[in-house]
Amino acid sequence: MLSKNKTAAIFRKEVLAMSAYKVADASGLIKLDAMENPYNWPDDLTKNWLEILKTCELNRYPDPEAKQLTQTIREQNNIPSTLGVLLGNGSDELIQILLMALLPNASVLSAQPSFVMYQQISQSLGLSFINTPLLPDSFELDLPAMLAAIAAHQPSIIFLAYPNNPTGNLFSAEAINKIITTANGLVIVDEAYASFANASFMNELTQHENLLVMRTVSKLGLAGLRLGYLVGASSIIEQLNKIRLPYNINILTQATAHLALTHHALFDEQTQKICTERTHVYDQLSSLDGITVYPSAANFILFKTPKDKATDIFTAIKQQGVLIKNLSPQGGLLADCLRVTISKPEENQAFLTALKASLENLA
Ligand SMILES: *Cc1c(COP(=O)(O)O)cnc(C)c1O
């Protein structure tokens, strides 16, 4: 085993200071912590899928450009041929590719709280990462503070999650536009939850050279596949494509995602059910004494519990068989906050029942 001194001589201090990304063990629990879609496929589609998998040649490398899948993504999103598309092993990999391509002294800007991987990957690469706090209560972008951070740090990349995770809201489109037109660097609008939101910057791409839109199929119902895509100016995608690993989208993902995306009516229907349930869970949470619930355009809801009770409530809910996400340890605007993923009616009900019981036990 290498001694501490020796690892310190090999690895960057940022890496030594990091903790690995931990995922809670959900065995035996109703899993409402990771924005997964709870619905399965109908039997005929599963059958069709297994037939396709049989034809996949696992002894061969996959198509390095995933041409068929890329074409399907282009068609379904009406992406003009003048724009480039880059596929990633999850959008997490696209974030990594973007950040790996930057100059060594580059800085990266995002809002706080937002998706943790922007910061995690920036730090792992030794880049300087700047967080601008969102406004309390509304979780809206603090535009003057963002513009000041842009002026002061000239970030090479700005990440904006739209809707934002973990707050669930859509930032003001006007504020985002102002950031895009002010920034000299790239602005990545991360639309991981686009299917639940009815809002997108995809149509703005042709107007702004420095804008890129990132999507994933994870929250749509295909988290196990690991597929994300980044759309933007061909001149930018061309640079990023050079550092993408040649076979980053495996053969099973290419075949499965192509099939799934050509059956998007099924996913639209599942998304619709989840949006209906989101309204129900929101209304139920709003009616609870001591709970502050925040509006969501995604497939999860953030809510605030009574002061210093979030961890107790989270634990009590877990003891009743439901796993949600405890964000309170992150502090700042997330102090006392929990996040629940919207799922099937009976699972949402189990969560609401467990929450109510844990609130009564507090009193
Ligand atoms: C979940 C999530 C991602 C990661 O998606 P993958 O494609 O599964 O890597 C990216 N951005 C945001 C805002 C997310 O919430």
Image (cartoon, rainbow, N blue to C red):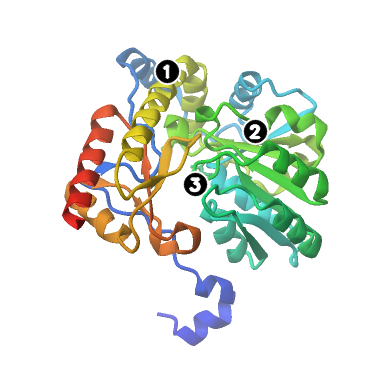
**Camera-side residue: 173 or 36?**
173
Q: Residues within 10 Å of mark 2 (few under 14, many from 20)?
A: some
The residue sitting at 42% across, 18% down in the picture is: 269
Nearer the camera: disc 1 or disc 2: 1
Q: Amino acid at mark 2?
A: Glu
- Kindly identify the residue that appears in the image at 42 percent across and 61 percent down: 335
Residue at (68, 30) in percent of width and height: 202
Find residue 269 and name its label. 1
Q: CA distance from mark 3 to mark 2?
A: 35 Å
Q: Is residue 58 visible?
A: no
Q: Using the rendered view, name the quadrant where residue 348 is placed.
A: top left
Q: Which of disc 1 and disc 3 is earlier in sequence?
A: 3
Element under label 1? helix
Residue 322 or residue 120, whichever sits in front: 322
Give the number of the disc on residue 167: 3
Classify mark 3 as within 8 Å of ligand 1 or not, answering yes or no. no
Instruction: Provide residue 61's location: percent of width, then percent of height.
Output: 55, 36
- The quarter holding residue 180 reads top right
Which of these two is toward me, 174 or 100? 174
Instruction: Please tell me whether mark 3 or mark 2 is closer to you in this view.
Output: 3
| Residue 24 to residue 13: above or below | above
Left or right: 255, with 347 as reference point: right
Question: Quadrant location of the N terminus?
Answer: bottom left
Q: Amino acid at mark 3?
A: Thr
Inter-mark Cα distance, 1 to 2: 30 Å
Disc 1 marks which amino acid?
Answer: Glu
Residue 54 location (% of width, % of height):
39, 22
Question: What residue does disc 2 label?
Answer: 65
